[in-house]
């Protein structure tokens, strides 16, 4: 078993799809189009972990000519393909009690930014604030019939619009979001089969570019030799955005993601868990949470298997019907002590199929 650092450097603008898409097919009143389509679509800034998984499965196929024909873009030996990448793409089990089988790919770590050799993450959502529990707690409030005591939050003002910030994990250098991501907007109109403009076909698509030598990275654990993969051109994202991929063999420990200790204000009278990746949590998992600063994002994914031939969403590829909501990376949860925080961390880890591909990662800090 080997661990590799995978780096992804955009070769231009990129587009990472999310829950919303442009209209699919000609039926404007289809349930899918009514619920999930829009004429303005913005790329996510980070790729979904399921997209990274799909990219890695395809990479292993392209490195195995006895299994996959690049000329035909087809799997030619399904039995060997199952051993190599598993039978199916990501799927969710009700109990969340076992990982999926992705063949030689055992696990992915969360995607993060890199500049040079330094990892860069979004700051925790309490980065600017001092959180204090104890004698100065605000009076109790009720949420879902539970009595909660609010902490004192030093430095917070409801009237202020706070910038999204990122931090270098070694240097502590802080970056504004606009110093990393550059918008690239495209406006257009679709045409009908007669070549005429479709009055209902106007659209706006917002791509992103990475500035100042930033790039994406993640760790993959697999039983496949990736050392020959250097400057491979790969496609990733809804519009087949191009990236340069390189793999570097790591030691057993991999890469540890942790915030510089002197960059975070201490929590007085308690302990906290910071999410390093988007995370699925059940309502019951939150029972011991004392207070939290969070945001959620919708999450859906595509379903394929080794029998898939047409990878168009109108073809064999199906989008899972259920919409999940993940707590966004950087969300912070507070607990009475480190024991309660560690118990919460166990619940985060218990979503095994999410943890396996780089979701549900956290740190107690």
Image (spheres, rainbow, N blue to C red):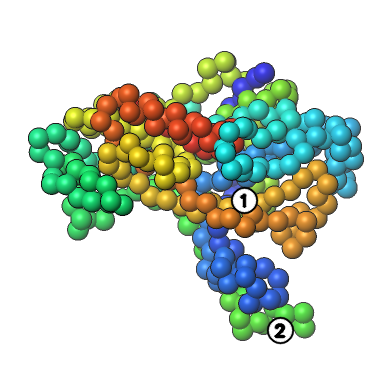
Q: Pick whichever, 64 or 24, lies toward us.
A: 24
Q: What is the quadrant of residue 276 in the picture?
A: top left
Q: Pick whichever, 9 or 328, lies toward us.
A: 328
Cα distance in 3D space between marks 2 and 1: 34 Å
The residue mark sitting in front, 2 or 1, is 1
Name the secondary structure under disc 2.
Answer: loop
**Image coords of residue 136 (percent x, y):** 10, 38
Seen at 61% across and 84% down, the residue is 199
Q: Is residue 302 left or right of residue 85?
A: left
Seen at 63% across and 32% down, the residue is 99
**Image coords of residue 31 (percent x, y):** 62, 70
Q: Residues within 10 Å of mark 1 (few under 14, many from 20)?
A: many
**Image coords of residue 145 (percent x, y):** 28, 51
Do the residues bearing badges 2 and 1 touch, measured as CB atoms within 8 Å?
no
Count of residue discs: 2
Q: Pick whichever, 192 or 76, lies toward us.
A: 76
Q: Residues within 10 Å of mark 2 (few under 14, many from 20)?
A: few
Seen at 57% across and 65% down, the residue is 36
Query: Height in image: 253 above or below 271?
Result: above
Query: Height in image: 260 above or below 78?
Result: above
Query: Height in image: 187 above or below 89?
Result: below
Which residue is tagged 2? 196
Q: Which of marks 1 and 2 precedes in the sequence? A: 2
Name the secondary structure under disc 1.
Answer: loop
Which residue is tagged 1? 301
- Most extreme residue toward the left, as rendered? 135
Judge whether residue 351 can be spotted in this image: yes
Judge whether residue 173 can be spotted in this image: no
Seen at 57% across and 15% down, the residue is 252
Q: Quadrant of the C terminus?
A: top left
Q: What is the quadrant of residue 101 in the picture?
A: top right
Q: Looking at the rendered structure, which numbered label has been put on residue 77?
A: none
């Amino acid at each position: 078993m080997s661990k590799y650092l995978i780096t992804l450097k955009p070769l231009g603008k990129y587009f990472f799809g999310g829950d919303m898409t442009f209209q699919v097919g000609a039926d404007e009143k289809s349930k899918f189009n009514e619920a999930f389509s829009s004429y303005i679509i913005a790329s996510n800034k980070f790729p979904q972990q399921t997209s990274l998984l799909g990219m890695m499965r395809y990479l292993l196929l392209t490195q195995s000519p006895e299994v996959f024909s690049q000329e035909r873009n087809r799997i030619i030996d399904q039995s060997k393909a199952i051993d190599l990448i598993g039978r199916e793409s990501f799927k969710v089990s009700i109990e969340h009690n076992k990982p999926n089988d992705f063949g030689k790919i055992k696990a992915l770590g969360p995607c993060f930014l890199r500049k040079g050799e330094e990892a860069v993450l979004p700051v925790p959502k309490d980065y600017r604030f001092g959180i204090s529990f104890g004698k100065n707690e605000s009076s109790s409030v009720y949420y879902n019939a539970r009595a909660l005591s609010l902490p004192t939050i030093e430095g917070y003002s409801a009237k202020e619009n706070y910038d999204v910030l990122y931090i270098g994990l070694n240097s502590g250098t802080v970056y504004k979001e606009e110093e990393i991501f550059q918008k690239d907007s495209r406006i257009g109109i679709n045409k009908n089969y007669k070549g005429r403009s479709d009055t209902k076909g106007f659209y706006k698509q917002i791509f992103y570019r990475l500035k100042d030598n930033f790039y994406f990275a993640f760790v993959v654990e697999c039983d496949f030799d990736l050392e020959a993969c250097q400057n491979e051109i790969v496609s990733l994202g809804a519009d087949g955005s191009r990236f340069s991929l390189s793999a570097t063999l790591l030691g057993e420990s991999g890469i540890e993601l942790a915030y510089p200790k002197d960059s975070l204000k201490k929590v007085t009278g308690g302990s906290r868990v910071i999410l390093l990746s988007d995370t699925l949590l059940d309502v019951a998992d939150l029972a011991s949470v004392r207070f939290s600063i969070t945001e959620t994002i919708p999450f859906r994914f595509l379903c394929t298997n080794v029998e898939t031939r047409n990878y168009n969403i109108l073809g064999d590829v199906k989008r899972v019907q259920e919409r999940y909501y993940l707590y966004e990376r950087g969300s912070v949860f507070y607990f009475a002590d480190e024991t309660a925080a560690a118990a919460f961390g166990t619940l985060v880890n218990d979503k095994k199929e999410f943890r396996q591909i780089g979701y549900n990662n956290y740190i107690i800090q």
